[in-house]
Image: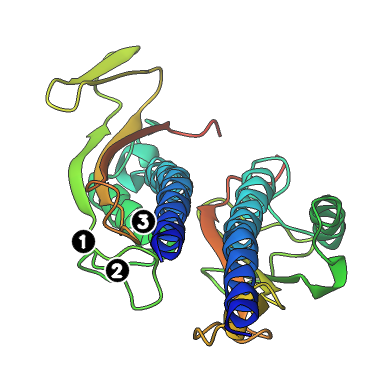
Amino acid sequence: MKQLLMFILLSGLICWMMFAPVYKHLAIMRQALLQQEVDYLLEVGASGTYGYIGESMIRQSRERLAARGFVAGDLVYEVSTTSGVDATSSASPVPRGTGIRLVIRYPYKNLFAIDRLIGAAVPDPSGMMSASGMKMSEYVPDR
Amino acid sequence: MYKLLLFLFSVVFAMMLHAFQMDQELALRTLFWAKHSLNRAAHAAAQQLDPDSLSRGVIDLDEAAAELAALQYLQANLQLDEHLMPLPDSFLQARVEVLAFEVIRASESFPYEYTNERLAFTVTLRRPGVVMAIRVEYPRLFSLLGPVSWELKGAAELVEL
């Protein structure tokens, strides 16, 4: 009986040891992918050609992230500017000198459920990981 | 009994390996994040035109406005306060130091080569621009890794109008 108890305890510990770090790695990778997506969208959106981060760009970004295992519908995009004007419309690009700020959020979901099993304090599943960045627009209207 | 000890020992060893790997992974991510933030700060600074020279038909940079913009963008991207101390929700924990900030104005002859011996940094600018270097310290999760800090260098030229 004692041996059986010991076996259950140890095998449980081994399972936790094998899987818990994988989920930490997943959290880091997701955060990194979000940051990479923010960098890319800002690089393109704030360039002289566009000057906005429009609906179609965000839709394509969702598709890219979905290909990496994100649930497209759960991604939250927040686009704002330093001057307060709207930066999502292709009809009115943000002029040169104004900063475009982008935040992408994604819920943690059950990434840390395995840690809750051993009683560790973990982020709420509805809590959001986020990546953000701000870049100055280069857009100059056509003369 | 000795098997149990061996087991516990290997558990500790495996966890240390995981912690070490995770810290290195995060450190690399932080390095890229800080470098991109620095690039954006230099980029914003290099767009600050001096209205006085512009009125004379010379495209030149305004040094005071450039420095203000650079700091503002660095603060926004790295989530720092006005003294470059990390805000409560920033990933960083130590103050970010500005090691070098230089505005290369239109009065220089181009191509201009900027050299900083101390930082071992050389960059060639073809137009007026901004050179900036910061020191960022990585907040280690575990003390397995030695202290990590980077001297990041960035430069940006005036964007073509």
Q: Mark 1 near mark 2, Cβ–Cβ under 8 Å? A: yes
Amino acid carrying mark 3 in the image: Leu
Q: Chain of mark 1?
A: B
Query: B11 or B157, which lies in front?
Result: B11
Look at mark 3 in the image and give the residue it sits on.
B74
Taking the spot 30% from the left edge, 26% from the top edge, the residue there is B106
N-terminal of the pair, mark 3 or mark 1, is 3
Q: Which mark, by number, is residue B86? A: 2
Mark 3–mark 1 Cα distance, whole angstroms, equals 12 Å
Q: Is residue B108 left or right of residue A95?
A: left
Dot 1 falls on a residue whose secondary structure is: loop
Q: Position of residue A56 (x, y in %)?
A: 87, 57
Q: Are marks 1 and 2 on the same chain?
A: yes
Query: Marks 3 and 1: same chain?
Result: yes
Q: Nearer the viewer, residue A23 or B156?
A: A23
Amino acid residing under circle 2:
Pro
Observer-nearest of B97 and A90: B97
Q: Are marks 2 and 3 on the same chain?
A: yes
Mark sitting on residue A48 = none
Residue shown at the point (87%, 59%) measured from the top left? A59
| Residue A13 placement (x, y as % from top left) | 57, 70
Quadrant in which residue B69 is drawn: bottom left
First along the sequence among labels 2 and 3: 3
Question: Residue B122 vs residue A8: left or right?
Answer: left
In the image, residue B27 sits, relative to residue B115, either above or below, namely: below
Q: Circle 2 marks a residue in which chain?
A: B
Relative to B128, say whether A109 is above or below: below
Camera-side residue of A5 and B63: A5
Q: Which residue is mark 1?
A: B95
> How far apart are the two marked residues, 2 and 3, measured between alpha carbons?
11 Å
Q: Is residue B35 visible?
A: yes
